[in-house]
Image (cartoon, rainbow, N blue to C red):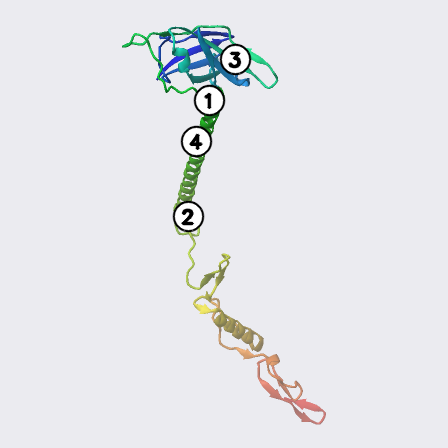
């Protein structure tokens, strides 16, 4: 399919192709790509009319799209040249126009940017008898359906792209988290010392709850119950005996029972300062021990 480029500058039309000739009796193989220098055309439902002397003008809808990142051109569109205007040799008149819902009408000046030349091999070009004639309404419906299909394809492609981007982002986040975790483990996986932070491992005699609470199970190799018994024995010795210890904390000889620890009445029996029990013997009005 050959494409001829036309330029609409202001309200005038000119060709931007080196070859502007179409061949008589061609059907559906020639199309026109048009570029507009003003964005005002985007505000109208634009149609293009092809006309040739002696032939009924053919009008067909032209769907425009905005041109981004261009300081010279604002809109563009492409349309197939109707076969009806290629039935005779001679120039083709092309007109772009549009009318909006407020009744505003925009239209280009008369222009003959294309021309039909005789076909080869036969003296006169003949249009095929079964060449379809599509009216403007059916063309518009067809174009709208194609546009819907294109939009649906864009949406599906966009959804696919979004799913792919989300999957990539999740994978990247997992990699970052894994990398950060590895860094933390590498940093603190060394055992802790008295002067440096590190990994503290739970050893014998210690217990950690699900909440991270650390507690002792054994004290110096003995259970908590055994430690409690030793504490009670120490208390018993403190309250019942007078004791002394050397500089190494070892019990010295000479421990004596405290008088308060022996249930005596203190009258007939008592404990002296040496921890000895004495009996009181009465002689008249006095007592002798």
- Whichever of callouts 1 and 4 sits on the residue coming sooner in the sequence is 1
Percent coordinates x, y for residue 216 in the rendering: 48, 63
Measured in 3D between alpha carbons, the distance from the residue under mark 2 to the one under mark 4, in whole angstroms, is 52 Å
Badge nearest the viewer, 3 or 4: 3
| Residue 188 image label | 2
- Whichever of callouts 1 and 3 sits on the residue coming sooner in the sequence is 3
Percent coordinates x, y for residue 202 in the rendering: 43, 58
Q: Is residue 284 visible?
A: yes
The residue that mark 1 highlights is 139
- Whichever of callouts 3 and 4 sits on the residue coming sooner in the sequence is 3
Q: Secondary structure at mark 2?
A: helix
Left or right of residue 141: residue 240: right
Whether 285 is drawn above or below 94: the answer is below
Callout 4: 10 Å neighbours few (<14), some, many (20+)? Answer: few
* Farthest-out residue, bottom: 284
Badge nearest the viewer, 1 or 2: 1
- Whichever of callouts 1 and 2 sits on the residue coming sooner in the sequence is 1
């Amino acid at each position: 399919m050959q494409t001829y480029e036309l330029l609409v500058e202001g309200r005038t039309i000119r060709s931007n192709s080196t070859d502007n000739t179409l061949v008589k009796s061609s059907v559906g193989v020639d199309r026109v790509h048009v570029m507009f220098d003003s964005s005002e055309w985007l505000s109208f439902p634009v149609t293009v009319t092809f006309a040739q002397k002696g032939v009924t003008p053919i009008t067909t809808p032209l769907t425009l799209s905005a041109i981004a990142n261009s300081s010279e051109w604002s809109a563009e569109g492409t349309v197939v040249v109707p076969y009806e205007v290629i039935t005779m040799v001679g120039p083709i008149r092309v007109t772009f126009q549009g009318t909006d819902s407020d009744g505003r009408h925009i239209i280009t000046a008369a222009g003959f940017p294309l021309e039909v030349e005789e076909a080869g091999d036969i003296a006169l070009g003949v249009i095929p008898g079964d060449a379809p004639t599509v009216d403007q309404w059916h063309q518009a419906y067809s174009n709208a359906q194609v546009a819907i299909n294109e939009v649906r394809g864009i949406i599906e492609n966009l959804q696919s792209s979004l799913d792919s981007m989300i999957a990539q982002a999740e994978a990247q986040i997992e990699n970052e988290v894994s990398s950060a975790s590895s860094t933390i483990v590498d940093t603190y996986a060394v055992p802790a010392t008295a002067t440096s932070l590190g990994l503290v491992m739970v050893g014998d005699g210690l217990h950690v709850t699900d909440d991270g609470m650390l507690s002792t199970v054994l004290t110096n190799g003995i259970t908590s119950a055994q430690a409690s018994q030793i504490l009670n024995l120490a208390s018993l010795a403190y309250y019942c005996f007078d004791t002394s210890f050397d500089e190494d904390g070892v019990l010295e000889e000479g421990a004596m029972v405290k008088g308060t620890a022996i249930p005596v009445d203190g009258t007939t029996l008592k404990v002296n300062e040496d921890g000895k029990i004495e009996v009181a013997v009465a002689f008249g009005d006095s007592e002798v021990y």
